[in-house]
Amino acid sequence: MPLPKTLLLLLPLLAAAQLATAQLVQPKAAFTRADTLRGGQPVARTCYDIRYYHLDVRLDPAKQSVSGSNLFRFAATQDFSRLQFDLFANLAVEKVLYHGQPVPFVREANAVFVTFPQVVRKGSQDEFTVQYSGQPTVAKRAPWDGGLVFSKDAQGQPWVASACQGVGASIWWPCKDQQADEVDSMLISISVPTGLQDVSNGRLRRVTDLKDGYTRFDWAVRNPINNYDVALNVGHYVHFGGVYAGEQGPLTLDYWVLPDNLAKAKAQFAANVPPMLKSMEHWFGPYPFYADGYKLVDAPHLGMEHQSAVAYGNHYQNGYLGQDRSGTGWGLKWDFIVVHESGHEWFGNSITSQDIADMWVHEGFTTYSEALFVESQYGKQAGQEYIHGQRRNIQNDAPIVGPYGVNKEGSGDMYDKGSNLLNMVRTVVNDDEKWRQMLRGLSKTFYHQTVTGAQIIDYLSKESGRDLSKIFAQYLRFSTLPILEIRFDKGQPLGRWQASAPGFDLPVRVRLRGGEYRFVAPTTKWGPLPLPGATKENVEVDTLNYYIGVLVE
């Protein structure tokens, strides 16, 4: 997802030692029953595994309304007679049909509970259909809030898009709105006033004139997809495309843009998409959705990582709305939205966190992908400078990991602090090819899966041959930075970490001024540092690659 707007306006980073002087004290958030229904995994959700959706929606741009249905096809994971799906309360559930007959349901907050006439047995395959209608929430500042965006293009034509990460897809369509269970495949049917087009995920299978002033577009998604990625993009689009010779053969590239943007889009996408794909496949492995292709779609908002149909709204310019978030100059050499939102195809779309409390898995790795793209284009030093520049956006305001089970993300530092954390792990691994294979291994091991943050950390620990859990704990679960303290006792350098995570043990690179860096391994207790000839005046710590505080006395 695009970075929070506030991150564009932050002052340069305060001194690390100042940031780490006091642990942030936050009032305990009060969560409601509605939060638990939205973010938790009660039996009414875990009793069924969603396998297939057919979302069939009719959009009326003039009335800003939707009507239609969604077919839920599922496998029962246990015996049950009652289940939960989700739909925002401002949208009406007209009927729930089971084997063609209406069945009773009740609503609580944005959850809907359906009772079946008999027990659905474990292992059985079954289905039900939800018919619904209403005016969905209108997003006021998409993509940072959620809902549908109702806009007009320069010619006065309707231009409508969905953007619902975080708040959830049930803000505009009925679904099992929990990231832990992705549907295996789906058909998206969007009917719009004739003359407009819908662009959704996957591949266009059919266009049908409904003979009533509406046209239906059927899009088939062959890969698992998380709910917030399911996209509706309606406008007066023109299409062009191409083919990328990828690791798994030809990958179709399809671009849907407004007519006024056609010339700009052809130039901007040609300059950015092929090198982006080359970099991502080099570092992370094959593009995860060859069966569904790769698309960029003009959107009336900044952008969003909608799987195989990435929403684009960066106005065909380099940088992030024309700015370089790193302040280094490297960020003005490429289109931020093309690179960042496409990076989510690997982290966020193929590998999806089960709970949004672990959204650092999406945003940390994808923000890091920006630096890897810079490295692939301009060399490792440029990539390292870009990562270092990302620190200017870090607030150190709260833990990156949010509370589980209540649909609550952690700090926006998941982007840039997450990126710097991953770069530190790379530095500790100290073998760039091994690190690349670890990243590619993540994509292979967790391909098209939902994961916990702990699974990602355990994998990286196993493949690196080092327990990285305490390093991740410090940067994900505490707002303060660790401080490397160095003092001298009778000329002998001693070091220790001052850190919030118990047992913190980050190996760090240190040198004598003008010399070669070497790794030292301080703990949270004072101990000797193997630095012959070190003095207070000549000892240097690698703060380009390490996001830490340093105190030498």
Image (cartoon, rainbow, N blue to C red):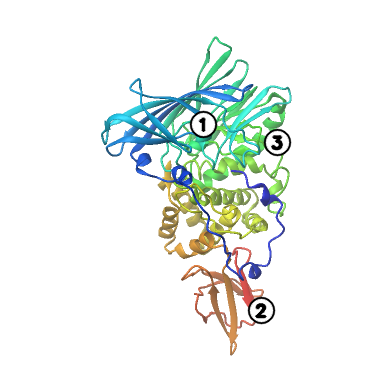
* Circle 2: element type: loop
Q: CA distance from mark 2 to mark 1?
A: 55 Å
Q: CA distance from mark 3 to mark 1?
A: 22 Å
Q: Which mark is residue 476?
A: none
* Circle 1: element type: loop
Q: Which residue is mark 3?
A: 316
Residue 447 in sight from this viewpoint:
no
Q: How many marks?
A: 3
How many residues crowd mark 3 within 10 Å: few (<14), some (14–19), many (20+)?
Answer: some
Q: Which mark's residue is nearer the viewer, 2 or 3?
A: 3
Residue 533 left/right relative to 225: right
Residue at 36% from the left image edge and 36% from the top image edge: 83
- Residue 528 in percent (x, y) is at 52, 82
Q: Which residue is mark 2?
A: 538
Residue at 66% from the left image edge and 57% from the top image edge: 385
Q: Which residue is mark 1?
A: 293
